[in-house]
Image (cartoon, grey):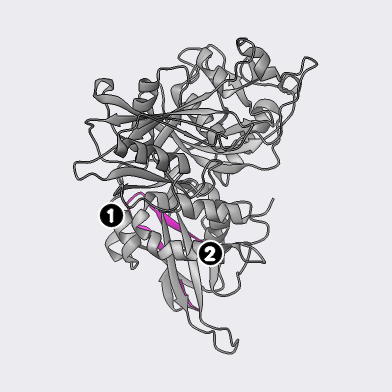
Amino acid sequence: MTLSHAHIRTAVETYLARHPHERPQLGRLLDAGALDRPPGIAGRLPSPAHVTCGAIVVDPLGRVLHVLNLVRGRVLAPGGHTELEDESPAEAVLRELHKESGIPPQAVTPWPGYETVPFDIDIRDIDTHPGKGDPVHRYVDLRFLFRLHAATEAPVVLRGEQATRVEWRSVDEVTSPSLREKLLKLTHAVEPETANASALICNDRGEYLLHLRDYLPGQIWEPGMWSLLGGGREPQDATLEHTVRRELDEEASLHIADLTPFGTEEATDDTGATVPIAIYAGRWNGDPRELHLTEGVMLAWFAPYDLHRLRIAPTTSDLVRRHAASHPAGTPRIATQHGTSPDEERRPACPRGTVLNVIGVHLYLERTDGTVLLGLRHPDSAFAPSTWHVLAGHCEQESAVTCLTREAREEAGLEIEPRDVELVHVVHHIDRAGDQPRMGLFFRARTWTGEPELREPDKCTQWKFWDPAALPEDLVPYTRVAIEGIRAGRPYSETGWA
């Protein structure tokens, strides 16, 4: 598998979710499609942009690695163009780091929270190269953050043909203002000597592969619980993708053709410490009973709506549900001889003629100045990509108000008390005739604490308060209907019905 457009675009979009103030500069690059032009990301792109990957390496003293580039006449972080054999940006970075400085991949560790997301993105114009006649072109440098292991000595071997000197500089001496600002905000007391990776594997039926761990309290993490396959990075793993592939092979002899970064989760170990886990998503349609399991009790498929009956960590179940919401099953479920799917067979029987309605809860958050909170959905979202929508979610095994307060906290960091919520509008809607009907409940929060934060950048890339009289054009249609109904004092609306 070679590095794809999706790797780069996902990395840039996730970065912008963390640094929305940089969207005016980087957003033009994405909107112009410069990252999608042939011959692809691997190698040099035609004008106007070249994509490169750089390594920001911090040693135990907090110094940053720099390489003097002879051709460019500048002191830069080690890095360069991606190659056809690179399977991820991280692999390209580690290859270039070794090439230019002599530091092997095993000598560094990704900084927690930045395993799959750039720490900084730099755009700069490069003048015409003498003798080549090339026009002025632009470099887009995706910079990933690493920490040098404490036991590793500072490198002195120069391997790149363009490099003449390696040196360690203090953060104050970093020449890039944006990079220097981000580095100054780091907590250097963090010691990311270990890193973990897990595989989020689903099939075409929309089920997820879970691993039942041995019940060995005090010996293993999450004993007797259902979890994802994965584990900690070892010295031979060049990247965290190598880690998760090795763990899949060692634990279950399982090989997934295509694994893509989905995000970074935080879990708490037995000591109470926060452990970052890089999540890689993949698809597989095999029978887990045929796998050779070397650890744990068993592997099994579970649908997202079945998770509530399992002994499973809340972070794991939330992760599965978020992935399911943004990545629907790829093929129709196979009907049984009775004409129903296996999922439908497991659900309680409904009265004849009954059609199940999906219940969605929505937060109508209005400030004292009358403006209303909307979020811009991720461009890869299965529902309404790159479209504005209120904070919303589907009811699980919970009440509607409980769902609302949970979604507000998980998606935006807002704390809302159930007693401060009131139902202000209901929309009964379908997208097209014959689709599953949906009931949208819109609740107003009379008061709340906190300011909207991007807690789930894979779902929402921006929060913004809008004047309800000047809503964005790219707004989910039934959301517009609901807001208009709330302002007019109407409690109920219908959309999509003939």
- Which secondary structure type mostly characterizes the magenta part of the structure? strand
- Give whichever of 428, 465 is nearer the camera: 428
Residue lying farthest to the right in this orientation: 337
Query: Identity of the amino acid at label 1?
Result: Leu
Residue lying farthest to the front in this orientation: 498
Q: At 55% across and 69% down in the image, what residue appears?
A: 50
Q: CA distance from mark 2 to mark 1?
A: 24 Å
Q: Which span is picked out in magenta?
A: 51-71
Q: Can residue 145 be seen in this snapshot?
A: no
Answer whether labels 2 and 1 touch (C-beta < 8 Å).
Answer: no
Across and down, in percent, residue 42 comes to 63, 62
Across and down, in percent, residue 242 comes to 61, 42
Viewport quadrant of the C terminus: top right
Give above or below for 442 relative to 300: below
Decide: few, some or many residues near mark 1? Use Cα within 10 Å; few <14, some 14-19, many ≥20: few
Q: Give the label, 2 or 1, closer to the camera.
A: 2
Give above or below for 76 relative to 248: below
Q: Can residue 46 be seen in this snapshot?
A: yes
Instruction: Say if the magenta span includes residue 20.
Output: no
Choose the circle earlier in sequence order: 2 or 1: 2
- Give whichever of 169, 222 is nearer the camera: 222
- Give whichever of 197, 400 is nearer the camera: 400
Query: Identity of the amino acid at label 2?
Result: Thr
Decide: few, some or many residues near mark 2? Use Cα within 10 Å; few <14, some 14-19, many ≥20: many
27 lies left or right of 258: left
Q: At 53% across and 29% down in the image, what residue appears?
A: 320
Instruction: Say if the magenta span includes residue 70.
Output: yes
Q: At 31% across and 50% down in the image, what residue appears?
A: 469
For residue 184, which numbered disc appears in the image? 1
The residue labelled by disc 2 is 52
Across and down, in percent, residue 358 comes to 52, 25
